[in-house]
Structure formats: C-alpha cells, structure tokens
C-alpha cells in the first residue's frame, strides 16, 4: 500500500523544535515574570516555572531564544520558498472561517483528509506565525531596549513592550492548549506529525 506524505520532514522537525522551544521559553519566562510581575497580585507557581531563580531563568530564556528565532526563520523561510504557506494556509475568508468555526463548535467539522486544513486551522496557524514574530520583536524591545529605540517606541515604551510580550505569550499558550485538545480529538494528526503520513 502506498502512502502520500502529508507533512514533509522539515515541517515535522521544525514543529517539534518549536514545541520544545516554546515550552522552555514560556516556563522560564514565567520565572522571569515572577521576579517583576506586570500584574501585582499574580505569580506563577514555582512548580511550572524553569530556572529556579531570576538568573537561572534568564540563562534558560536567552539560550532557548536563539533556538526559537532560528527555527522560526527556517520554518517561515521554507514555507515561503516552497510555496507551502500559500498552498496550505491561504486564502482564508471570513465566510469560510465562520462556517468552519460554527461546525467545530457543534462537533460537526470533518477531519477525514488531514492533508487539507480547514479555515479554523488556517487562521490559527497564521495567527501563531504572526504571534511568534510579535513575541520575538517585543522580546527584542525588552532585551535590547537601548539598541532598538524605534522598536521600543513602536511597542509603546519599555513597560508596554513587557505587556505586549506577556500578551503574545498568552496567545501562544492558549494556542498550545487548544492544539493539544485538537490532537486528543483527532489522534491521527499526531501520527502525521511524527511519521509524515
């Protein structure tokens, strides 16, 4: 029996690298947040943070940052160069998005053909690509605020860049949770992301 490759190796590899990088960035970021919270009454439990203290969390965050940025550049670059971005994720119309979202909320959205994304998936993946870019840019505005004054200004200043970074991270975590829930509902999608078909 012949099987068609649904996800090429570079997509699967970058997917798993991204999953690892995001988990490490988020958990070390939560430890950094705890040292100087944006919201005074909220701290993340130490059991779900990485680094043990501010210095350790910063070391993890900065080390994994390079992995996230490099992987993002490779993923977006290969998607653009191969035409996969246009082929798999575009176009997305408001009508198809509303229709597929309605079907998904009623449990009626089909997943027979895993080689094609529905409008909700297309929109979610496009949002995540933009969101990771925003995480990177806002992180750069925080980390190198003096070297990138225009970026800092575009973010609304240093303190606002922290809020943008935290908000973008929250969108990424929400996507991650929904993504895992969808994998639980359609377990074949996990096999596709492991073996490509």
Image (cartoon, rainbow, N blue to C red):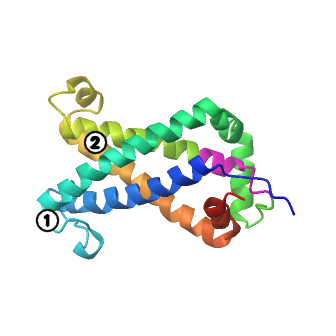
- Furthest toward the front, the residue is 1
- Label 2: few (<14), some or many (≥20) within 10 Å? some
186 in magenta:
no
**Magenta stretch?**
113-124
Lower position in the chain sequence, tag 1 or tag 2: 1
Foreground of the two, 132 or 92: 132
Q: Is residue 103 above or below residue 150?
A: below
Residue on which disc 2 sits: 139
Near mark 1 (Cα within 10 A), the count class, few <14, some 14-19 or many ≥20, is some
Q: Is residue 39 visible?
A: no
Report if residue 43 is visible in the image.
yes
Residue under the image location 63 percent in, 37 percent down: 85
Position of residue 95 measured from the top left corner of the image (x, y, whole percent): 74, 41
Find out whether residue 118 is within the magenta segment: yes
Q: Check disc 2 and report its element: helix, strand or loop.
A: helix
View extreme (top): residue: 150
Q: CA distance from mark 1 to mark 2?
A: 19 Å
Q: Residue at x 40, y 41 (%)?
A: 70
The residue that label 1 is drawn on is 53
Compared with 196, 125 (above or below) is above
């Amino acid at each position: 029996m012949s099987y068609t490759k649904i996800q090429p190796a570079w997509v699967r590899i970058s997917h798993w690298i991204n999953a690892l990088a995001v988990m490490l960035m988020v958990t070390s970021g939560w430890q950094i947040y705890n040292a100087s919270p944006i919201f005074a009454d909220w701290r993340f439990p130490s059991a779900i943070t990485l680094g043990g203290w501010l210095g350790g969390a910063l070391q993890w965050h900065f080390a994994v940052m390079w992995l996230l940025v490099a992987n993002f550049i490779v993923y977006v670059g290969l998607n653009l160069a191969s035409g996969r971005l246009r082929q798999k994720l575009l176009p997305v119309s408001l009508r198809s998005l509303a229709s597929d979202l309605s079907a998904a909320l009623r449990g009626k959205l089909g997943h027979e053909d895993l080689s094609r994304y529905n409008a909700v998936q297309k929109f979610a993946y496009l949002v995540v690509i933009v969101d990771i870019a925003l995480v990177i840019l806002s992180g750069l505005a925080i980390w190198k605020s003096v070297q990138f004054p225009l970026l800092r200004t575009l973010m609304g200043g240093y303190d606002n860049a922290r809020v943008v970074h935290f908000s973008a991270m929250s969108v990424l975590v929400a996507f991650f949770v929904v993504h895992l829930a969808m994998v639980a509902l359609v377990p074949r999608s996990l096999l596709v992301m492991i073996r490509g078909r």
